[in-house]
Image (tube, rainbow, N blue to C red):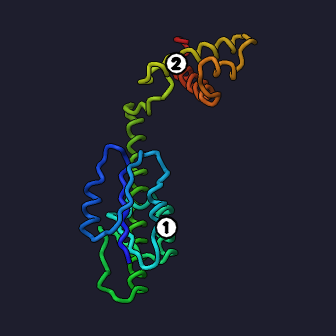
């Protein structure tokens, strides 16, 4: 039987040292580790760890959120671990190592993990509701301006501000009857994807709708 650890951080700036130290303290023989960006869903070291484990191995993680990103993800990973005959040990959850019957130990661990996933999901839903409520209050008070668009007159990226301005100018030319212009040509001229041009066109319409008629 081997103790196999898995450690993960979500950004390149975070440090794996704390997780690795606690895994070593737990007697882990081999550690799979990776640093991922927040948008990167590919976890090659997790896949390698799942391929590596065998019967009677023990998979050790510092916490469940290091293992999976959501309840569905966690369920799939835990089922894979069990299918390979290994056990899961989550260091920040209660330990049932003193229970000799492995079936009973697995049953109790499953109950604790399911309870943890339920609580975590409820907390996420509560946060979303509170954020939405906060946005609605801010809107009523006139304090919420929304997320700054990637392409727009106030984009933090100077090049994308320019692209937005040029796209609007060319779209207006097309609307004024310039038959030599197509949306595909405009996108090609600006070096953007057609879907980006359609998004800019939508932004342009929204901006125009917010301008008083007397100022148009």
Residue lying furthest bottom: 101
- Residue 155 in percent (x, y) is at 45, 24
User: Does 189 sit above or below residue 101?
Assistant: above
Q: Secondary structure at mark 2?
A: loop
Image point 75% across, 12% down: which residue? 179
Q: Quadrant of the C terminus?
A: top right
Left/right of residue 72 with respect to residue 174 in the rendered view = left
User: Does 90 sit above or below residue 127?
Assistant: below
Left/right of residue 21 with respect to residue 149 in the rendered view = left
Left/right of residue 71 with respect to residue 138 in the rendered view = right
Image point 30% across, 74% down: which residue? 94
Check residue 211 in the rendering and tell me which mark sits there, or answer none.
2
Q: Which residue is mark 1?
A: 75
- Decide which of 154, 210 is in the foreground and name it: 154
- Identify the mark nearer the N-term, 1 or 2: 1
Q: Quadrant of the N terminus?
A: bottom left
- Residue 146 in percent (x, y) is at 44, 33
Circle 2 packing at 10 Å, graded few (<14), some (14-19), many (20+), is few
Check residue 39 in the rendering and tell me which mark sits there, or answer none.
none
């Amino acid at each position: 039987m081997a103790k196999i650890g898995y450690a993960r951080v979500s950004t390149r700036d975070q440090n794996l040292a704390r997780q690795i130290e606690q895994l070593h303290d737990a007697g882990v023989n081999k550690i799979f580790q990776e640093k991922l960006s927040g948008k990167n869903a590919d976890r090659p070291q997790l896949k390698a760890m799942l391929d590596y484990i065998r019967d009677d191995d023990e998979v050790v993680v510092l916490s469940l959120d290091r293992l999976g990103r959501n309840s569905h993800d966690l369920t799939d990973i835990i089922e894979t671990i069990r299918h390979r005959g290994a056990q899961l040990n989550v260091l920040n959850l209660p330990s049932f190592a003193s229970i000799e019957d492995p079936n009973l130990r697995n049953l109790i661990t499953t109950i604790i993990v399911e309870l943890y996933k339920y609580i975590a999901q409820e907390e996420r839903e509560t946060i979303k509701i509170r954020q939405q409520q906060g946005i609605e209050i801010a809107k009523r008070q006139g304090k919420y301006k929304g997320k700054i668009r990637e392409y727009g007159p106030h984009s933090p990226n100077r090049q994308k501000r320019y692209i937005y301005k040029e796209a609007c100018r060319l779209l207006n030319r097309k609307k004024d009857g310039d038959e030599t212009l197509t949306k595909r040509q405009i996108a090609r001229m600006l070096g953007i994807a057609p879907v980006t041009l359609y998004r800019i066109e939508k932004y342009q319409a929204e901006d125009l709708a917010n301008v008083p008629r007397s100022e148009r």
